[in-house]
Amino acid sequence: MIIDLLYLIAAVCFILALKGLSSPDSASSGNWIGIAGMVFACAAAYLSTDISDAIWTLFAICIGGGIGIYITKSVSMTSLPQMVAAFHSLVGMAAVLVAFSAYYAPNIFKIIDKLENIYKSSLIEMGLGVAIGAITFSGSLIAFAKLHEIYKGNAVPKELNAFLGSSVLCLIFYFVMTESSGAFLLIALFSFILGATLIMPIGGADMPVVVSMLNSYSGWAASGIGFTLHNDLLIITGALVGSSGAILSYIMCKGMNRSLLNVIFPSGQDVSGSKKSNAVRPFKQGSPEDAAFILKNAKSVIVVPGYGMATSQAQHALKEMSDLLKKNGTTVRYAIHPVAGRMPGHMNVLLAEANVPYDDVFELDEINRDFATCDVAYVIGANDVTNPAAKNDPSSSIYGMPIFEVDKAKIVLFLKRSMGTGYAGVDNELFYAQNTMMLLGDAKKTTEAIVKAL
Ligand code: NAP
């Protein structure tokens, strides 16, 4: 009774945690509610273990908790995506191990009938659990290696993935029909290979979508474990993680105007990095002193941060600049695009780290109309999220992606190192516009120089 109650409280905590995490100002409390939910879940798991195993359970909780605290304290903000990928691999491996335990000791899991045969429903859960778990495990490891830049990726023939995928499905069917241990081992082996070959060809910059998708897989794997272990909390939590990961992947793809299928099965075109533009066209270049003069005379400024702000770590200098401008009576607001940077919430996290007030931060729909009435758009390390080709050029790969209409501002200050393109590899007409001033150089150094000049 007490255990069921603890599981129920934990499940409610996880749902409230997700709700809290959906907005920056409630994210911190959402995180604490999630931690409380996990404490209740661990307490319930501990109380439900046999007394002889209780010491091992306590030992596992302490070791796992200790490693978790150490990792979260030592990992830097910019390494969060690979940390998340590494954690997903553990969920995948847990699903594989539980499925194997259930297969080799079905009596302990109470999943056998009077004739000592494993229930068909449990065989389906095991087959799917081991396949999803193994794909999540190896896929997450490859995603980790790519995000950590220790592996660049390889092309994989689509036929190989098709062969592996259909083999896994046939093997699951055969396993459910025959309970064959050989088929069970082959499901695991083929799925481990499939997880790796699916992720290997995907471009480095698409990894955030992949990580979110693997997050979703790990949730479904956990849900599968929940069915095998007859644990309602795991089923609920797994379903929450599975569906939220799927929704997040969808939102990211929509923000990039790409389909999930196009991300998972890339066309072979490299979209993973900044390319140099071949065009030699006249453009206006300014100095930090010019920019300081313009900003000093502006009544309203909208800052558009992007991936370049993250790589140069310019957020603190930016906050310093905003504070100086505010003291001067200027209104300073920040405009965050849903896919700015390289992971969801990338810009929000960096701005929060620099103590930028939440009230100054606006989403695309909330602020886009205000560019028309603002004096300066300060575009710092952003590119694609401002590119008018998304509106004007139907042949462009980013056509249809919603963008900030920074071109409508009186003056656009563009901070980047070169005239090169962004992630999508598309030239940006805005660099050559009449009202644009390019401030070429590292975003942090340029902003620091502006602060000095101000
Ligand atoms: P972006 O289009 O990739 O542009 C970033 C710009 O920053 C580059 O043009 C680069 O130009 C500049 N830059 C790099 N390092 C810099 C430095 N140290 N100082 C100054 N500038 C620097 O980035 P974005 O506008 O943020 O757009 C994000 C892109 O990523 C979108 O295409 C989106 O679809 C994609 N994406 C986002 C997510 C997500 O979840 N957020 C996930 C997957 C893909 P230089 O090289 O000339 O300096």
Image (spheres, grey):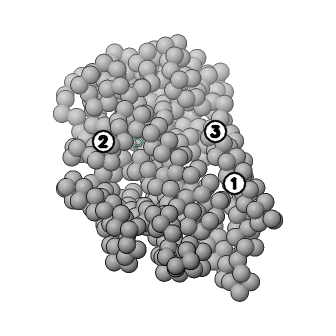
Q: Residue furthest right?
A: 2
Does label 2 point to a residue whose CB lies under 8 Å from ligand 1? no
Query: Mark 1, mark 3: which one is toward the viewer?
Result: 1
- Residue 243 pos. (x, y %): 53, 46
Disc number placed over residue 262 in the picture, else none: 2
- Residue 45 pos. (x, y %): 70, 70
Give the SS element for disc 1.
helix
- Report which quarter residue 38 is drawn in: bottom right
Residue 139 higher or lower than 439, as above or below: below
- Residue 217 pos. (x, y %): 46, 55
Quadrant location, the N terminus? bottom right
Q: Which residue occupies the foreground of this view, 154 or 122?
A: 122
Callout 3 amino acid:
Ser
**Residues marked 3 and 2 touching at CB (< 8 Å):** no
Badge 3 local density, few (<14 within 10 Å), some, or many (20+)? few
Query: Mark 1, mark 2: which one is toward the viewer?
Result: 1
Disc number placed over residue 188 in the picture, else none: none
- Mark 1 or mark 2, earlier in chain: 1
The answer to whether one can see residue 77 in this image is no
What residue did someone put label 1 on?
11
What whole-number distance in Å separates the C-alpha atoms at marks 1 and 2? 35 Å
What residue did someone put label 3 on?
23
Which residue is located at x 33 percent, y 60 percent?
Answer: 169
Badge 2 local density, few (<14 within 10 Å), some, or many (20+)? few
Query: Mark 3, mark 2: which one is toward the viewer?
Result: 2
Give the SS element for disc 3.
loop
Callout 1 amino acid:
Ala
Which residue is located at x 78 percent, y 60 percent?
Answer: 5
Q: Residue furthest top?
A: 373
Give the SS element for disc 2.
helix
